[in-house]
Amino acid sequence: MVKIALIGVGYWGKNLARVFSQLGNLAVICDSDPGQLARMKQLYKGVETCGDYAEILKDSHVDGVAVVTPAITHYAVAKKALEAGKHVFVEKPMTLSAAEGEELTGIAEKKDLRLMVGHLMEYHPAVEALKSLIDSGDLGRIYYVYSQRLNLGKIRQDENALWSFAPHDLSVILYLLGEGVTKVYATGESYLQDGIEDVVFVNLRYKDGRIANVHLSWLDPNKKRELTIVGSKKMAIFDDMQAEEKLKIYDKGADINTSYQSYGEFLTLRFGSVYIPKIEMKEPLLIECRHFIDCIENKRQPRSDGKDGLRVTRLLEAAQRSLKQGVPVSL
């Protein structure tokens, strides 16, 4: 049985504690807050607790650690864990710089350890269904993608909307469309706190002409978690706010007739039916955590491995530079 130590049980760490416990792999919970540890002891009988993660790194019975600490500490904690011979699951963003991400990835490869990044949405059943539709060619050639991750709150003081929200959407876009982004342009504004952007728009351009737009905000009247994909054959909308009908496929588009007699015949708009595929919904976090355990047990490379985390971090870095400089950044 793979034994996992959880470092950090704040807002999101509590969810990982629940899921790793449900899987039967939670062995130790570590947090600097004694109050949090006391609550965890009540919830998870038989699970050890500690206030210093250095104790975990010295424990030979611990196979892997889940790092759910503030983003600014991810690099240092994950590095020490890898150097101690532990497999590492680290929440998004993996690091705050590509250089740090490269170092972690290198250590994991050298020591033959699993390094996995918490790109949760890559494990969402609806996203997996979208991936199948794209790979099969059912949507045709993908023209463009846009996503919206909006809400009123939770307002951060230690990171802007880009670093807080964008890892979800950027990881999904890279998962669905692959690599090949050549240019990043980001714009945003700080309305509530100086120097911390509340709203950010990120534009990506691929070398083959595909484009993507990501709208991020914690200062918006609507809560939205939506992704739209426009292809040459069909279009799709993934709405994660829907309880059941999360994915809709639209048989709509514009057909080009190369042997036309007039302009009206050259371009024909197509308005077909809307299809709602049946998706067997399972909790993405449960799928993600189970995948981490499976990768450790069977020495498999995680879907959202260090290289995946590094790709996302590079886009975040480029978007941050563009945000500050006000110009597009080439990759």
Image (cartoon, helix red, strand yellow):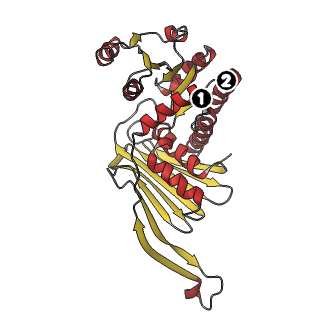
| Alpha carbon distance from label 1 to label 2 | 12 Å
**Which element is circle 1 on?**
helix
- For label 2, count other residues whose C-alpha is less than 10 Å away and answer few (under 14), some (14-19) or many (20+): some
Residue occupied by mark 1: 298
Q: Nearer the viewer, residue 181 or 82?
A: 82
Location of residue 21 by image quarter: top left
**Residue 8 appears anywhere in the view:** yes
Task: Check residue 167 in the rendering and tell me which mark sits there, or answer none.
Answer: none
Q: Nearer the viewer, residue 70 or 236?
A: 236
Is there CB contact under 8 Å for labels 1 and 2?
no
Of all residues, the one furthest to the right in this rendering is 110
Instruction: Name the amino acid, label 1.
Output: Asn
Instruction: Please report the residue visible at 55 percent of the width from the left and 24 percent of the height from the top.
Output: 88
Bin the neighbour count of mark 1 within 10 Å (Cα to Cα): few under 14, some 14-19, many 20 and up. Answer: few
Residue 179, percent from left and from top: 65, 48
- Mark 1 or mark 2, whichever is nearer to me: 1
The image quarter in which residue 140 lies? bottom right
Residue at image position (53%, 27%) is 89
Number of marks in picture: 2
Residue denoted by label 2 = 112
Residue 104 pos. (x, y %): 64, 25
Percent across and percent down for residue 318 are: 61, 42
Q: Which residue is nearer to you in this view: 52 or 313?
A: 52
Q: Is residue 149 above or below residue 232?
A: above
Residue 261 drawn at (x, y percent): 62, 92
User: Which residue shows up at 48% across the image and 41% down it?
Assistant: 123
Instruction: Of the two numbered discs 1 and 2 on the same chain, state the one appearing first in sequence.
Output: 2
**Residue occupying image coordinates x 53% and y 75%:** 254
What amino acid type should be assigned to the residue bearing mark 2?
Answer: Asp
Mark 2 element type: loop
- Residue reaching furthest bottom? 261
Left or right relative to 147: residue 105: right
